[in-house]
Amino acid sequence: MRILVTGGAGFLGSHLAEHFLGQGHEVIVLDNFITGAIENIKGLLSHPDFTFKKQDVTDYIEVPGRLDAVFHFASPASPVDYAQYPIQTLKAGALGTHKTLGLAKDKKAAYVLASTSEVYGDPLVSPQPESYWGNVNPIGPRGVYDEAKRFAEAMAMAYHRTHRVKVHIARIFNTYGPRMRKNDGRAVPNFITQALANKPITVYGRGRQTRSLCFVTDLVRGLDSLLHSPISSPVNIGNPDEHTILEIAQRIKKLTGSKSRIVFDPLPVDDPRVRCPDIRLAKRALRWKPLIPLEVGLKRTIDYFRG
Ligand code: NAD
Ligand code: UDP
């Protein structure tokens, strides 16, 4: 296959690119480095089946030759990043999705959208099944991301229904692993960086809010299965192993052998109180489930941050 990955110089995109190259496919990455870095793909640049082009996906996209699949992963993804780049985030989800869907239609390629658990907002139902419509504040600080992704899902379904594009919508839950940026502001890189430096570990609120963390290799396997499935409606991909943020901070402190104190900082506005995927659909339709326990994934991520 010849596969395009937008946002391929970012955390998830670079793992996807590496995965498909490893399977013998050809991979083209587009990225404008707004939150990604060339270092994430430096090991791929000399690969004969790998092409990189610096491009903003909100501009017209031209890719010569055939394409079998388009993975649209370009978007700032951490709350700190999308607060810093609100308009670019809206544009990546809206204009970027439109442009990449147009490309997939033109090339008769399958399309995989990186959607998110954030479409559920601060959920009133837990765990969250795909049938839940969500509880999103459109005008709060997270609205730029949540609404862009909700628009992206609507656009993908419209291209599917109107133009018969073979779309797949992955509702990705919090994923972590090597190549996350140290300073991207998300809980796992923050806690690991703070713990390794014996600096205070900043838990927001009282740390009672929950998240369910999926290791990146599990996510990539799920996305690969999704591409090969006939399913076009959204599918949750995540690990239902739910913990409070305080538990995750304590776990990281222990695994790093850190002397850090845990401190409590103000809870960001609209921070979801719970988040846990209902993955019955993925288990049934993709024959997929996560395999890497939190402890194992955290150790691998800590090793990466140590390096
Ligand atoms: P990331 O910031 O590491 O990667 C995003 C990449 O997209 C970066 O390399 C960035 O430079 C690029 N990009 C952003 N806007 C662009 C534009 N207009 N043109 C070209 N490139 C652009 O973030 P990530 O965690 O790897 O997230 C990747 C995708 O997965 C995002 O769409 C995100 O919304 C989605 N997602 C991630 C998670 C997670 O837990 N990591 C959860 C849900 C959804
Ligand atoms: N969080 C925290 N301390 C930090 C960074 C994040 O307590 O230094 C909390 C944040 O408030 C949220 C959770 O950890 O409740 C997960 O945050 P992250 O930014 O990783 O992703 P989110 O799930 O909010 O998109």
Image (cartoon, grey):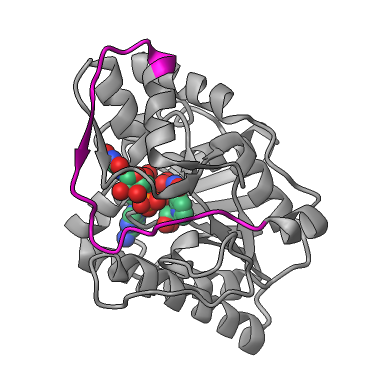
Q: Which residue is drawn at 66% across and 71% down?
A: 108
Of residues 119 and 216, the one drawn nearer to the viewer in this rendering: 119
Above or below 88: residue 181: above
Q: Can residue 58 be seen?
A: no
Q: In the image, is 307 to the left or to the right of 104?
A: left
* Magenta stretch holds residue 274: yes
Instruction: Specify the quadrant of the image occupied by residue 285.
Output: bottom right
Name the spot of residue 139 as percent of width and height, x first. Answer: 25, 77
Q: What stretch is highlighted in magenta?
A: 254-278
Residue at the farthest bottom position? 162
Q: Can residue 196 be seen?
A: yes
Of residues 151 and 99, the one drawn nearer to the viewer in this rendering: 151
The secondary structure that dominates the magenta segment is loop
* Magenta stretch holds residue 267: yes
Instruction: Specify the quadrant of the image occupied by residue 9.
Output: top left
Q: Which residue is drawn at 31% across and 37% down?
A: 37
Q: Residue at x 64, y 75 (%)?
A: 131
